[in-house]
Image (spheres, grey):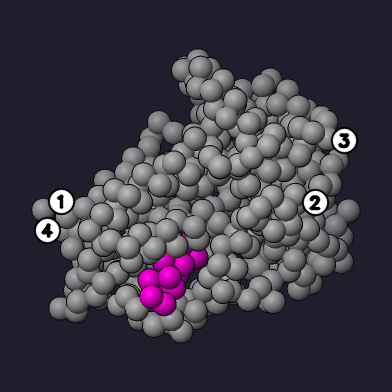
Amino acid sequence: MTERDVLVIGGGPAGAAAAIVAAEAGARVTVFEKGLPGRDKICGDGLTPRAVAALDQLGVDLGDAHRIDGLRMVANRTVRQLDWPGIPPFPAHGAVWPRRRLDLRLMELADKAGAELRWEHEATPVLDGRRVVGVSANGQEWRGDLVVVAAGAPGAVARLLGAERDQREPFGLAIRTYAESPRHAERYLEACLTLRDESGTAVPGYGWIFPAGDGTVNIGVGALSTMRGFKKLNLNRLQDSYRSLVQESWGLGPDLERPRAWRLPMSTVRRHGPGWVAIGDAAGLVNPMNGEGIDYGLESGMLAAELFLEDPITVPVRYDRIIGERFDAFLRTGRRFSFLIGHPTLLRTGLRFAVGTQGIANVTLQVMGNLVDSSTPGVGGVTMRVADRLLGLADPVLRATRAAA
């Protein structure tokens, strides 16, 4: 049996961030990743200014990424192109970086920091009563003071720890592929907020094109589970429908790979317990209004490691409290908003409002860029705090009248 300080299940951005911070400070860290080096992760590949700030804290060189200066929002005939606002501590730029390169870079930094990387190891927590005391993988067992769960969308690990998605809350589905485009070097993400399925039903979600700067763009669509007929939604057809809208304007070539879909967790019933914490997607830290979670994954991983270095014994409780103070109100508002726009009439009204004026569009930009949390100053922060209170009052009615999925 091997003794370590920190055991990390999952080698994505969240897990790698935790490993980098802990290992750089001298902690004995092992990361268990079930895939191979350079494995792909289905994702939009977009990095918000918030994610760029976190990567900068980790010392990640973004020279291999494509710089993004803002977001172009499309709602029917309304088009608004806005620059990232540069609200401190976040820079006025984001990036697009395919996950196979981003994730590998982060794991390389974890290795350089002194973390032990165990590729092709699917780890399972080891419990002593209710306390997690280590992990088992590939017929071996490791013991550690803290197990960091960074395994992504809830699965076997979450079921074992009682950290599954809250079934009362919404979740998302998304699909993406890559295509060549002469506009691949543009510095604006494009998001179409007015999606419809093959029957003409308005879809709460959006379609995107993220220029990668390497001759290709990432093109995809995402939808929320609060829409009418969600269980019958065909993501491939929705992707085809969106592609037809942007085919000519972006000069898209054929798909470079088969479109691939994934689930977006947006809640969890538990994100900590004796001897363990969940970070990133495993903790439900995904913005319901854009499906983005890389930045939250990086921040939560760094926080878990920092708290461990301060006091290993109290990590789980302190981590849960700080994450709650920082993100819970905003993410709760997003989940409630998803029930609101699950009503087709309210969805159409809300989209017109979201981009109807420059001032409101600026707030929408902050929301889409994950630039709002409990500490956000100015109009964006005030708007979200007011929305949290108002949607809290409306939430019981919105849930009771939600359309059948």
Residue 160 locus on image (x, y percent): 24, 52
- Badge 4 density bin: few <14, some 14–19, many ≥20, Cα 10 Å: few
Toward which corner of the image does residue 134 lie, by quadrant? bottom left
Asked whether disc 3 touches disc 2, contact meaning CB atoms under 8 Å apart, the reply is no
Whole-angstrom CA distance, mark 4 to mark 1, is 6 Å
> Label 3 sits on what residue type?
Arg
Whole-angstrom CA distance, mark 3 to mark 1, is 55 Å
Instruction: Please provide the residue range marked out in magenta.
Output: 11-25
- 290 to 43, vertically: above or below: above
Q: Secondary structure at mark 1?
A: loop
Residue 283 locus on image (x, y percent): 40, 49
Which mark is in front, 4 or 3? 4
Toward which corner of the image does residue 385 lie, by quadrant? top right
Mark closer to the chain start, 2 or 4: 2
Mark closer to the chain start, 1 or 2: 2
Residue 90 locus on image (x, y percent): 65, 56
Asked whether disc 4 touches disc 1, contact meaning CB atoms under 8 Å apart, the reply is no
| Residue pointed to by mark 2 | 83
Which mark is in front, 2 or 4? 2
Which mark is in front, 1 or 2? 2
Q: Secondary structure at mark 4?
A: strand
| Residue pointed to by mark 3 | 77
Residue 130's tag is 1
| Residue pointed to by mark 4 | 128
Mark closer to the chain start, 3 or 1: 3
Say if residue 15 shows up in the picture.
no
> Label 2 sits on what residue type?
Asp
Mark closer to the chain start, 4 or 3: 3
Mark closer to the chain start, 3 or 2: 3
> Label 1 sits on what residue type?
Arg
